[in-house]
Amino acid sequence: MHLIMWVVIGLVVLSIGGSLFSFFHYQPYRNSYFSFELFYTLLFVYISVMLGFASIYFILSFNGIILIEGNAFKSVNVLESLAHSLYFSGVTLLTVGYGDITPIGIGRLLALIEALIGYILPAAFFLKLWQSSIPHQSPENEQEKFNHL
């Protein structure tokens, strides 16, 4: 039974890897607007925002509990607090959260800000991608367009 489970997991991982490979390397049009630079920048921004908020949650946890798991106030050791902070930050940034870890106090405001950033980043990424795909015109060309009207 374990062998079948590992074979299925291996096939899923290969499928995901193949999908990512084809996304990055298959360009059906010669003038593809996909930008590795923008993609890596977005990935870096997501990781740094996630780690930044996780650090804030972790540091604030030393002044009191700001993240609770399972609606129960319990004291956790430093490693568990770091794990909770990283997990909660990632889930809050990339989704709307699962509800298994809940912020309290100032943590609620921080979670709202982080969720807003996670919500706005994809739109900003696509806007930047769209802007970079439009050929830039010099101010003289813009003025000539208006003079012909």
Image (cartoon, helix red, strand yellow):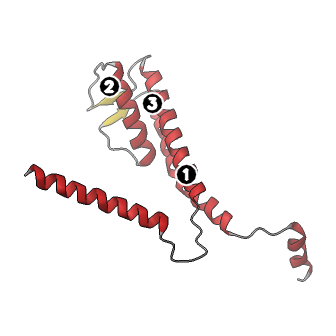
Which of discs 1 and 2 lies nearer the camera? The answer is: 1
Q: Is residue 117 visible?
A: no
Q: Earlier in the sequence, mark 1 or mark 2?
A: 1
Quarter of the image where one finds residue 15: bottom left
Which of discs 1 and 3 lies nearer the camera? The answer is: 1
As rendered, which of 25 and 32 lies closer to the eye?
25
- Residue 114 spot, x, y in % from top left: 50, 40
Quarter of the image where one finds residue 108: top left
Q: Which residue is mark 1?
A: 40
- Mark 2: few/some/many CA within 10 Å (<14, 14-19, 20+): few
Q: Residue at x 40, y 29 (%)?
A: 104
Q: Which mark is residue 80?
A: 2
Left or right of residue 142: residue 81: left
Q: Residue at x 60, y 55 (%)?
A: 37
Q: Quick check: marks 1 and 2 in contact, CB under 8 Å?
A: no
On screen, residue 16 above or below 99: below
Q: Which residue is mark 3?
A: 107
- Mark 3: few/some/many CA within 10 Å (<14, 14-19, 20+): some
Pick out the residue farthest to the left.
1
What kind of element bears circle 2? helix
As rendered, which of 133 and 110 lies closer to the eye?
133
What amino acid does circle 3 point to? Gly
On screen, residue 143 above or below 121: below
What amino acid does circle 2 point to? Glu
- Quarter of the picture containing the C terminus is bottom right
Quarter of the image where one finds residue 139: bottom right
Q: Residue at x 29, y 38 (%)?
A: 100
